[in-house]
Amino acid sequence: MNPSDQGMPPPAGKASLVRGIFARIAGRYDLLNALLSLGLHRTWRRAAAAQLDLVAGSTAVDLCCGTGELTRALARLAGPENVVGLDFVPEMLERARLRHPGIRFLEADALATALPEGSFDGASVAFALRNVEDVEALFREMTRLVRPGGRVVSLELTRPGGLLGCLHGLVLRWIVPLVGGMLSGQGGAYRYLARSIAEFLPVEEVARRMERAGLEEIRILPLTGGIVTLHVGRRPTRPSDE
């Protein structure tokens, strides 16, 4: 049985599973993002990039960058030479480099990038919190990478409430695996992705983990009725023990 057809993996086994899933769907990833989001994914990414307050000459890093769509949005604000995208799936990075040749993309683990501390004005991650082994560790690494006063933003698929939430649940259960499977040939991968949204942390818990990771001034910004949510935080300008 394909691992992605089983239940959600334990945290310690998630990295290997996720790497395999995204390697298999890399070729259809952008097309399916466009279809399943009804074309809104670029609007959401632009909204995320805007939260970093980048200007020409600012520096930014995009973790779990995939095919580089959010990285490109950052580059439009800061300049492509000032932005770097990181991912641990070579197949996704190959597409990113083909699609965005002016931007630097590196293969790296988002939980331990080995990049110098405080070397960026802003750090972003999109549609990846659900797929990392340790959400708090990811935010710690993002906090480490930005300078004091620098901003961190996460864009994630979330669960809206009310009637929209009921409809959203049906789409996740039936439409996402069906369309994803038909167009990618990887129905199991899209069943995993749908479950990862349905079973992910509440937005308030994500904010608490950002705070525990050392961020402050945390804001929760739902978009499109809560189908996606932005979490924004800032690295303190002084150590917390001062």
Image: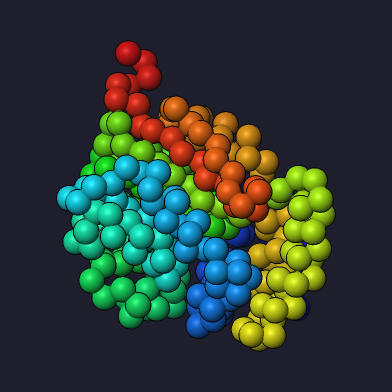
Q: Is residue 51 visible?
A: yes
Q: Nearer the viewer, residue 4 or 157?
A: 157
Please give the name of the residue rendered at 23% of the width and 47% of the height, measured from the top-left corner.
Answer: 55
Residue at figure coordinates x 32%, y 42% from the top left:
53
Instruction: Determine whether, in the image, residue 183 is placed left or right of residue 119.
Output: right
Q: In this view, does 12 lie to the left or right of 66?
A: right
Q: Which of 70 and 39 is in front in this view?
A: 39
Report the side of 43 relative to 85 (left or right).
right
Res 4 visible: no
Task: Work out which residue is located at the far top of the displayed protein and give it.
Answer: 242
Q: Residue at x 66, y 73 (%)?
A: 189
Q: Residue at x 34, y 64 (%)?
A: 72
Q: Where is residue 201 in the image (x, y as percent from the top left)?
A: 66, 44
* Location of the N terminus (image quadrant): bottom right
Q: In this view, does 98 lie above or below 157?
A: below
As drawn, 135 above or below 77: above
Quarter occupied by residue 239: top left
- Residue 142 position (above or below residue 40): above
Residue 21 is situated, as x and y percent measured from the top left of the image, at: 59, 73
Q: Position of residue 59 (x, y in %)?
A: 24, 49
**Looking at the rendering, in which quadrant would you find the C terminus?**
top left
